[in-house]
Amino acid sequence: MSLVLLPTDALIVVDVQTDFCPGGALAVADGDAVVPVINRLAGHFRNVILTQDWHPAGHASFASSHAGMAPFQTTEMPYGTQVLWPDHCVQGTPGAALHPDLSIPHAQLIIRKGYHPAVDSYSAFQEADRSTHTGLAGYLRERGIARVFVVGLATDYCVGWTALDARTAGFDATVIEDATRGIGLDGSMARAWEAMAAAGVGRMMSTAIV
Ligand code: VGL
Ligand code: ZN
């Protein structure tokens, strides 16, 4: 079964950055395996948007910003429970760069997120306070995009939240499973897939397109 892509489809490539790949500060197991799959997929899309996790030094999501806290513990923030991460994707550092083998010259927009010092942003649409918008929904709407396909890192955080918020913003959304890898903290993978299914996010393999 192959899927016919439309001019109103967009591929959203989430956080394929050095720090999320093996050897990086917040490495996702097998994270770099998504790169060749995404490069191949991207050639089939007229519209491609990339995202970049882009934190200032000392960001509130870093465990190092909280006395006595270690990475992967949680803390309460004004907007809810926050997982504390190792320092990662600090603006302008090599770890924040897109993976060097990612090759999508026709990508049209890079959305940077997580740049407000006190608020995290897994989603490419809305920050973790659930009220600050990145502008992506307006951009997609103005360009007539109706359907988005979400790939990249990590399935259970930035990919999942982006796909869920795409639905909330009124877009049809599908995650391409073999073009994503997850972190997996305390059942986060199962929770993410359940939440996506409940919200009507589709799930397919890249072989349905390529
Ligand atoms: C991400 C944790 C912290 C992600 C970003 O890209 O999934 N996860 N920052
Ligand atoms: Zn981050």
Image (tube, rainbow, N blue to C red):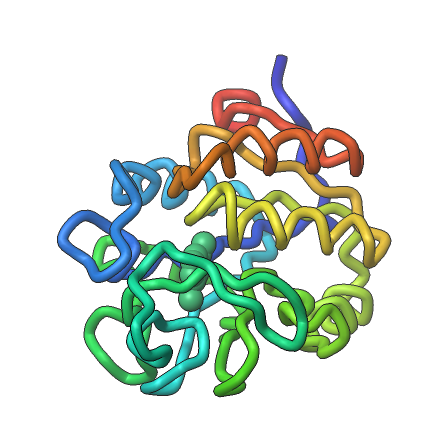
Left or right: 195, with 44 as reference point: right
Q: Position of residue 61 (x, y in %)?
A: 44, 72
User: Could one spot residue 43 in this view of the protein?
Assistant: no
Judge by depth and name the residue closer to the eye, 177 or 90: 90
Q: Quadrant of residue 70?
A: bottom left
Location of residue 19 in the rendering, given as x and y in whole percent from the top left corner: 26, 61
Looking at the picture, tell me which residue is in the foreground, 44 or 183. Answer: 183
In the image, what residue occupies the spot 49% across and 28% down?
206
**Residue placed most toward the observer, 189 or 42:** 189
Count the labels in the image. 0
| Whole-percent x, y for residue 17 in the image | 31, 61
For the N terminus, which image quadrant? top right
From this viewpoint, is residue 175 visible?
Answer: yes
Tell me the residue at 72%/76% (across/down): 133
Residue at the spot x=36%, y=72% of the render?
62
- Identify whether 51 is placed above or below 11: below
**Extreme top residue here?**
1
| Residue 174 screen position, x and y as percent | 66, 37
Q: Eyeballing the image, is 67 above or below 6?
A: below
Query: In the orientation shown, which residue stands out farthest toward the right?
Result: 170
Residue visible at 34% across and 70% down in the picture: 63
Name which quarter of the figure residue 198 lies in: top right
Up/down of 47 relative to 114, above or below: above
Which residue is outermost to the front? 68
In the figure, residue 137 lies in which quadrant?
Answer: bottom right
Give the quarter the ligand 1 occupies: bottom left
